[in-house]
Image: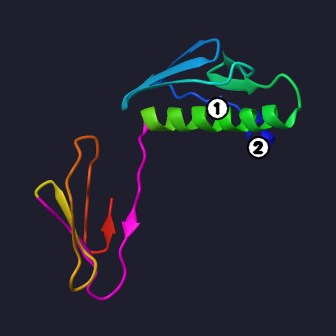
């Protein structure tokens, strides 16, 4: 994980980052996220990049280093552009369709799955893909 931790996290123009010790608050167009990381990690903001440093090369600190950097990167991605999950449905008799705000998945002759729409999600569907 330490190779991942060495990479800086780039901060886009419309994302605001506040760092207080190991507590990170990130605000962007899609909302805001905050997280408190292990106290051993040193997190700093330099030249529109977030840099994570570890105190030593101990195994635990190397794992914390990569994990901290990965979580911060996911937070920046989440507040900037959000996340997308594409569900692909293949096979005869399988399909997904939107009925109002609910997603109806037909998985075989006998199985009909109704997923109620959550307000935080946006759903798009054609016969094979659900976004």
Q: Is residue 75 left or right of residue 30?
A: right
Q: Is residue 29 visible?
A: yes
Crowd tier of the residue under label 2, counting other residues whose Cα lies within 10 Å: few below 14, some 14–19, many 20 or above: some
Q: Is residue 7 visible?
A: no
Q: Give residue 25's position: percent from left, percent from top.
A: 50, 19
Q: Eyeballing the image, is 129 above or below 7? A: below
Q: What is the C-alpha distance between the residues marked 2 and 1? A: 15 Å
Q: Is residue 63 left or right of residue 91?
A: right
Q: Eyeballing the image, is 103 above or below 16? A: below
Q: Give residue 12's position: percent from left, percent from top.
A: 52, 29
The disc, 2 or 1, on the residue closer to the chain's N-terminal end is: 2
| Closer to us: 31 or 29 | 31
| Magenta segment main secondary structure | loop
Residue 9's mark? 1
Q: Is residue 127 left or right of residue 12?
A: left
Where, by quadrant of the figure, is residue 49 drawn? top right
Residue at the location (19% across, 54% down)?
A: 116
Point out the residue furthest to the right here.
Answer: 57
Q: Eyeballing the image, is 72 above or below 46? A: below
Point out the residue furthest to the left here.
Answer: 100
Tell me the residue that label 2 is attached to.
1
Looking at the rendering, the stretch of residues picked out in magenta corresponds to: 80-99
> Which quadrant is home to the N terminus?
top right
């Amino acid at each position: 994980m330490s190779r991942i931790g060495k990479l800086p996290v780039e901060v886009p123009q419309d994302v605001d980052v506040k760092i207080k010790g190991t507590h990170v608050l990130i605000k962007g167009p899609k909302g805001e996220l905050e997280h408190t990381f292990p106290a051993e990690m040193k997190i700093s903001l330099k030249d529109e990049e977030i840099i994570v440093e570890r105190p030593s090369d101990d195994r635990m600190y190397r794992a914390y280093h990569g994990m901290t950097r990965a979580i911060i990167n996911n937070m920046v991605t989440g507040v900037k552009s959000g996340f997308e999950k594409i569900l692909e449905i293949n096979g005869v008799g399988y399909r997904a369709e939107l009925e109002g705000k609910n997603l109806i998945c037909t998985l075989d002759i006998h199985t009909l799955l109704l997923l109620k729409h959550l307000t935080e999600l946006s759903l798009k569907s054609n016969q094979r893909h659900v976004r």
